[in-house]
Amino acid sequence: MRAFLIVLDSVGVGEAPDASTYGDSGANTLAHTATAVGGLHMPTLTTWGLGCIPSLLPSGIAFAGIPPVPHPIASYGAMQEVSKGKDTTTGHWEMAGLELKRGFALFPPGPPSFPAELISEFTKRTGRPVIGNRAASGTRIIEELGPEQMKTGAWIVYTSADSVFQIAAHEEIIPLPELYHGCEIARTLCDPLMVGRVIARPFTGRPGTFTRTGNRRDFSFPLPEPCILDAVSEAGFPVAAVGKIDDVFPGHNFAPKAHVENNADAESATLDIATNLSKGLVFVNLIDFDMLYGHRRDPAGYARALEKADAFIGNLAAVLHKSDLLIVTADHGNDPTFKGTDHTREWVPLLVYQPDRAGTGLGLRKGFFDIAQSLACFFGLPSMPRGVSFVPANETLSTQG
């Protein structure tokens, strides 16, 4: 028995009921992307029922090129996040069964963005000065401050609308081990402030041609309680991580693990695991939608990535066993046609494919933690503290030890 959880990072499907609280009224990542490019071609997820989701939502905005189908082969619905926040960590943790009622700390645009005490202690412990210290686009602040960073050896430190302490450094000026160590120091300093993530943002090149590399690392806040990953592991099932999942869930012993920073490598690694893993949970994050196209407000690139991911999901479905479970969802929105460069608070899609079961409507669900409850049910585990399962109990597993 195997379960695959695929997170299409930032592929929201319409403004959440509380979107106005986040300044995101009117956001709709998938619908606006589809309209911007004259329609999407996603045959796999169309047959699964992706185009049926708008009829469930208050906005009801159709996804151009993805029509509703009369008999979807997967179950379909949409989920509303209940935790406070709209970032990667919050969304993934809620899928795993947690709820963050307080939310992670956010910082002002600045400059300065971060407390003086934090910056002072960080420079003292790392032995390097700090430049930046404000909210910024990662690519833009590297273009602006990269030359100074190369001359002075300073850290470029910046934040965004999310709870992040980001550290950029040229790989030839500050080697990766030192950058990662600096992030570990920052992680310790940021824990009392409840900062969601410390992110290493290495880059290379020369002024005018700086490029961020694939050596990004995320250092997440420690999980406040056990999650579904712990329960699955303790029951004797392997838990595999693909993409940046191992960064989002620090301390979990993933095996196998494929830490990659782009969709193509994540998709390839997932197919390899599907070929070799006989049982367990495979947790996958596909990051390109968010990192390359959402934040950069590039709907054309976003659309291309969606269509490639659709083909990958079709290939993965083709190698599933009859008893397997495949869930496709997202962790938040990032409308590439919206104002600014930040995430958007949206409903996320829920598509659940089981080769041996017919599709059905799953409705609108309050809480991403329905995924954790469903995985517990699928693997025959005790109920999680939160959520309502959308899959039937696995009778075979529930009768075993």
Image: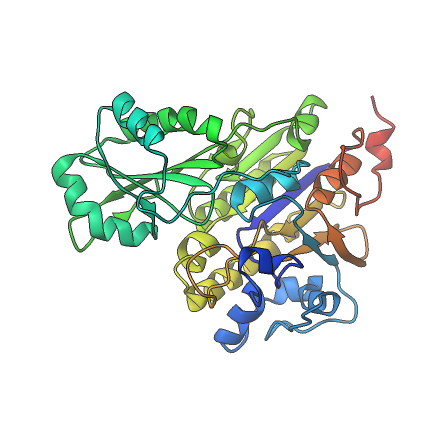
Q: Residue furthest left?
A: 151
**x 75%, y 60%: residue:** 73
Residue lying furthest bottom in this view?
38
Q: Position of residue 215 (x, y in %)?
A: 34, 38
Above/below status of 231 relative to 294: above
Residue placed most toward the observer, 353 or 302: 302
Q: Give whichever of 275, 281 is nearer the camera.
A: 281
Q: Nearer the viewer, residue 65 or 355?
A: 65
* Residue 162 in picture, x, y percent from top left: 47, 46
Q: Please say whether residue 216 is visible from this viewpoint.
A: no
Q: Quadrant of the rendered structure where residue 375 is?
A: top right
The answer to whether one can see residue 242 in this image is: yes
In the image, what residue occupies the spot 78% across and 29% down?
381
Q: Quadrant of the N terminus?
A: top right
- Snapshot colouring: rainbow
The relative height of residue 34 versus residue 321 in the rendered view (above or below) is below
Tell whether 278 sits left or right of 205.
Answer: right
Residue 88 in percent (x, y) is at 52, 44
Name above or below for residue 259 compared with residue 80: above
Left or right of residue 316: residue 374: right
Q: Does residue 183 appear left or right of residue 240 in this picture?
A: left
Question: Quick check: 332 above or below 32?
Answer: above
Quadrant where the C terminus lies? Answer: top right
Residue 304: percent from the left, percent from the top?
46, 65
Q: How many marks?
A: 0
Q: For residue 152, what is the image quadrant? A: top left
At 73% across and 50% down in the image, what residue appears? 366
